[in-house]
Amino acid sequence: MGEHVDRLRQRYDAFTRGDVADALSLAHDDVLWQGTPVENVPGAGDHQGKEALQAMLAAIPEHWVEFSLAADQFVEQDDTVVVLGHVDAKAKATGTQVKVPFAHVLTFEGGKVRRMTSLTDTAIFVAALDKKPIAR
């Protein structure tokens, strides 16, 4: 495994343990999170900076009774790492349990995550949360 993958694996494990501070320790202060453009999905849109990312993650319990993230595979090429995994979650509004695959594309700059793009099946989240999708 490459240097970035080893460090990322530790951060994903930290998130799973609920240690958001450790999970974000690898993020650049001005990190850019690029979420889905579909509104009504928690985490939608762009979030610039570590504080914005912390606020987005802190909102997870507003929508989900249970929420876990599993990183199943890491693929590294130069300063880019693709993480393939899945989310297991239970929606607070409906009680619906979901298992949703994701791909995270992370770009490193100076040893820190500068940009993270999240790709996932938003229709599953929208249905579980009993919301109507609104495209931006």
Image (spheres, rainbow, N blue to C red):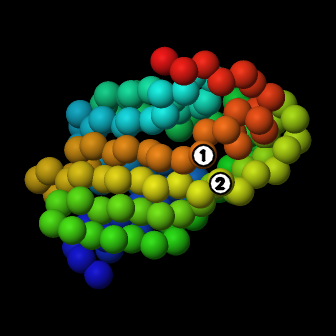
Report the front residue among 16 and 41: 41
- Which structural element holds mark 1? loop
Q: Where's residue 116, x and y in %?
A: 34, 45
Image position of 67 with respect to 127: above or below? below
| Foreground tag (1 vs 2) | 1
Mark drawn on residue 28: none
Mark 1 and mark 2 lie on one chain; the one further toward the N terminus is 2
Alpha-carbon span between mark 1 and mark 2: 7 Å
The answer to whether one can see residue 56 in this image is no
Which residue type does callout 1 highlight? Answer: Asp
Report the front residue among 47 and 132: 132
Q: Where's residue 95, x and y in %?
A: 88, 41
Image position of 23 with respect to 84: above or below? above
Q: Where's residue 46, x and y in %?
A: 39, 28
Image position of 119 with respect to 44: above or below? below
Q: Is residue 113 left or right of residue 111?
A: right
- Which structural element holds mark 2? strand
Q: Where's residue 91, x and y in %?
A: 79, 40
Q: Residue at 35% across / 53% down in the picture?
A: 105
Q: Quickly name the residue at label 2.
A: 100
Marks 2 and 1: in contact by CB < 8 Å? yes
The answer to whether one can see residue 92 in this image is yes
Residue 5 placement: quadrant: bottom left
Residue farthest toward the bottom in the current orientation of the protein? 1
Mark drawn on residue 121: 1
Which residue type does callout 2 highlight? Answer: Val
